Amino acid sequence: MEKVYFMDDRSQSNQTSLVAKMLTLFDAARFGDMIKPNDVVAVKLHMGEFNNTAYIRPVYVRALVDKIKSLGGDPMVVDTTTLPYFTYASRVTALDHLKTVARNGFTMASVGCPIVIADGFAGTDDVRIDLPEGFILKEQYIGAGIALADSMIMLSHFKGHPMGTYGGALKNMGVGCASKRGKLNLHLGGHPRYGLRARPYVPERCVGKNCPDFDICRQICSVGAIKVTEKRIQWDKEKCVGCLACLPLLAMCGVAMMADDYFDATSAAIADSALAAAKALGPKKIGYINLALDISPFCDCVTYSDRAIVPNLGVFASWDPVALDSACLQKATESSGMPGSVAMAKGVMDPGLPKFTACGSFMGISQEIQPNVGQKIGLGSREYELVDVPPMDNDVPFTFSRIPAGAKHSKLFAKKGDIYPPGGFKRADEVDLEDMR
């Protein structure tokens, strides 16, 4: 059984801060063993959508980048372009993506290394990976900047996800490492059974140009598969590539929904795509860290962040992404739901109930599909040993400066001279605190 290293989310000292725990688990798992001097090391994470607030904070990334540099590695923070997914795209090109993540606090100055959109400006700079062992995908396309790296740390925010049911290491790797055409593949664009071409289409529900949103529908499709007439919408399913840009609009109108089993098949395809990324880098070239914090019901790819569905669980690390996600799912299942969250609305507050099947998925899709497929195709194992890791004894690596405050202040006080005014500050000698209580 693969080990999953774990530290809970409680913090009461330098050594038990969440940043320190992340680095402690990095050492406990011996991720440094795969980093050789001058190796290009990709740090893969989701840097958040426009106005999302639950994504991993830049401070974690900076600490990890500094750790990689200390081992002689040459780090880069990576992500890939997206399909539109929404009506208005904010990460669909490298330019859009960099603007969005800079607004979220991710720049070369903040993280300490370059930020690379690994599949290029338009998402077609990729490497094709043959995938005969795939459950549904038999090939996949991985962003070149990731596939050509020497090693990678997969730093993932564990939370819910509207299509994958939950998002963890498998989703961060399976979706996040795929190029734009890789995403078209894993979202089953053009698939005759599960893709958008197979979805129910009811054009008579459209009122054409009488709809206030008709002009958006007119412009929403990048391949010209949608046209709006005076009284109807026309959809050419043979042209449709499955980019999902039209999904929010057409689904709300009831004009077009999803094919049967679409979400189940997409969850399976995420695991296939994750295997492709693992094959691109090679065995023991990826270390996985999950931060099970701010566990929102939906992914960091939506433009808002709802209340967490369970309390913070902690920090997890492993060489096996299937075991890692399985451990996080188990911890979430064992947890009580968060009062006032979607978990309460969906009736899954009690320990022992699966939280993401109810809260992460639109359709109640099983949260077990991703790890089950991952195990079936040989990406990892659902059997794991959870190893509780104690904090480091020495807090020096986790302090800002090794110079005690007195040594700094004594110079300032001596030079400035008037920091403490002669005779002291003007203050009342005694007040009635009981009255304030």
Image (cartoon, rainbow, N blue to C red):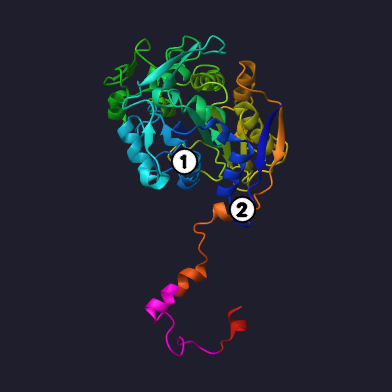
Q: Residue at x 30, y 17 (%)?
A: 223
As drawn, is 214 to the left or to the right of 5? left
| Residue in the image at 67% along x and 34% along y | 4
The quarter of the picture where residue 290 lies is top right
Q: Which mark is residue 69?
A: 1
Name the residue located 38 percent from the left edge and 12 percent from the top edge.
237
Left or right of residue 194: residue 339: right
The location of residue 203, given as percent across then percent down, is 38, 18
Q: Which residues are magenta?
A: 411-429
Callout 1: helix, strand or loop?
A: helix
- Three-letter code for the amino acid on which mark 1 is drawn: Lys
Q: Is residue 202 visible?
A: no
Would you identify the image quadrant in which residue 233 lies? top left
Is 152 on the left-hand or right-hand side of 123?
right
Residue 334, x across and y down, in percent: 71, 39
Instruction: Answer whether residue 375 is magenta in the image.
Output: no
Q: Could you tell which of marks 2 and 1 lies nearer the N-terminus?
A: 2
Foreground of the two, 310 or 172: 172
Magenta region, main secondary structure: loop
Which quarter of the rendered picture does the N terminus lie within? Answer: top right
162 above or below 186? below
- Residue corresponding to mark 2: 15
